[in-house]
Image (tube, rainbow, N blue to C red):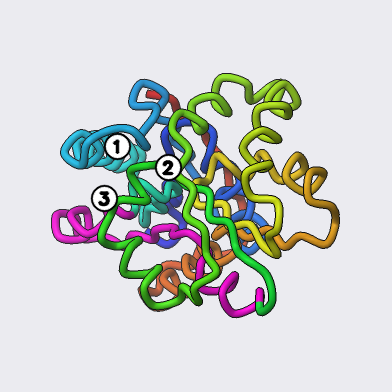
């Protein structure tokens, strides 16, 4: 079982950044990445719809014989991960907006939190925000943005003008939290808009560290040797 792959899924390509962080930290592990293109986007769906799609993704990954699953989507984590942990006897690692590190590091200016409408409305996120909001966080749900990134993943530059229009509403910020894994693909555009002084936060490195800890706790770390990465689309 230790040499079995780790499953990673998202509603499309958004979780690729999460997968990369996991690969960088756990280069001896094998991975199966599942892109739920038919369920895209999650961010505008109801809770019941998201839970159904997430369960279908998990069952598809279980068919691949995975030993642990990373829910590489903020919306899916907020809505569905608790139900998954109750239903399936295996480790799950989720992702959440990097509100905590942004709050701790951004002491002077405002923090812009970009996320999906579904994540913004969930109790799990609101609880996180209540613990770390220092009164300078601006929550900015972006309807349809993840879907546009998915559609233009081969030409992210084509979204530059649209992203600049969004960011012009929030000029004076010290940090930007990318509360959707798809938004990681916009890092260069956001940095160009604000300049190098801006701090940009995503949860990918934290997910990788948590995954490693969970594997260690459950004695599931792979032995050194051959490993693979498989991509699957449903």
**Is residue 189 within the magenta segment?**
no
The residue carrying mark 3 is 79
In the figure, is residue 100 to the left or right of 57?
A: right
* Residue shown at the point (61%, 46%) measured from the top left: 17
Residue at left offset 19%, top offset 36%: 52
Alpha carbon distance from label 1 to label 2 = 30 Å
Which residue range is magenta in the image? Answer: 78-106
| Residue identifier under label 1 | 63
**Camera-side residue: 220 or 135?**
135
Identify the mark nearer the N-term, 3 or 2.
Answer: 3
Which quarter of the picture shows residue 169?
Answer: top right
Tell me the crowding category of disc 3: few under 14, some 14 to 19, or many 20 or more residues within 10 angstroms, Cα based.
many
Quarter of the image for the N terminus: give it: bottom left
User: Along the line of sight, which residue is nearer the eye, 91 or 163?
Assistant: 163
State whether residue 76 is above or below residue 45: below
Residue at 66% from the left image edge and 42% from the top image edge: 167
Report if residue 93 lies within the magenta region: yes
**Kind of element beneath mark 2:** loop
Of tags 3 and 2, which is closer to the observer? 2
- Give coordinates of residue 140: x percent, y percent: 49, 48
Residue 59: percent from left, percent from top? 25, 39
**Local crowd size for mark 1, using a 10 Å CA cut-off: few (<14), some (14–19), many (≥20):** few
Q: Check disc 2 and report the residue beneath it.
A: 116
Return the mark for residue 9.
none
Picture coordinates of residue 34 (x, y %)? 43, 35
SS at mark 1 in the image: loop
């Amino acid at each position: 079982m230790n040499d079995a792959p780790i499953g990673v899924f998202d509603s499309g390509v958004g979780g690729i950044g999460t997968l990369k962080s996991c690969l960088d930290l756990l280069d001896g592990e094998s991975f199966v990445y599942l892109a739920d293109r038919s369920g895209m986007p999650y961010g505008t769906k109801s809770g019941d719809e998201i839970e159904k799609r997430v369960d279908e993704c998990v069952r598809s990954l279980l068919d691949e014989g995975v030993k642990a699953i990373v829910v590489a989507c903020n919306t899916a984590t907020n809505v569905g991960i608790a139900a998954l942990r109750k239903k399936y006897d295996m480790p799950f690692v989720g992702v959440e907006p990097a509100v905590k590190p942004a709050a701790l590091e951004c002491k002077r200016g405002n923090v812009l939190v970009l996320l999906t409408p579904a994540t913004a409305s969930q109790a799990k996120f609101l609880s996180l925000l209540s613990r770390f909001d220092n009164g300078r966080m601006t929550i900015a749900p972006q309807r349809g943005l993840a879907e546009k990134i998915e559609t233009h993943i081969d030409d992210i530059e084509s979204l530059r003008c649209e992203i600049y229009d969004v960011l012009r509403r929030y000029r004076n910020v010290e940090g930007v939290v990318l509360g959707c894994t798809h938004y990681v693909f916009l890092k260069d555009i956001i940095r160009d808009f604000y300049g190098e002084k801006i701090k940009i936060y995503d949860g990918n490195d934290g997910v990788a560290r948590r995954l490693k800890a969970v594997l260690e706790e459950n004695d599931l770390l792979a032995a050194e040797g051959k490993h693979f990465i498989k991509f699957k689309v449903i």
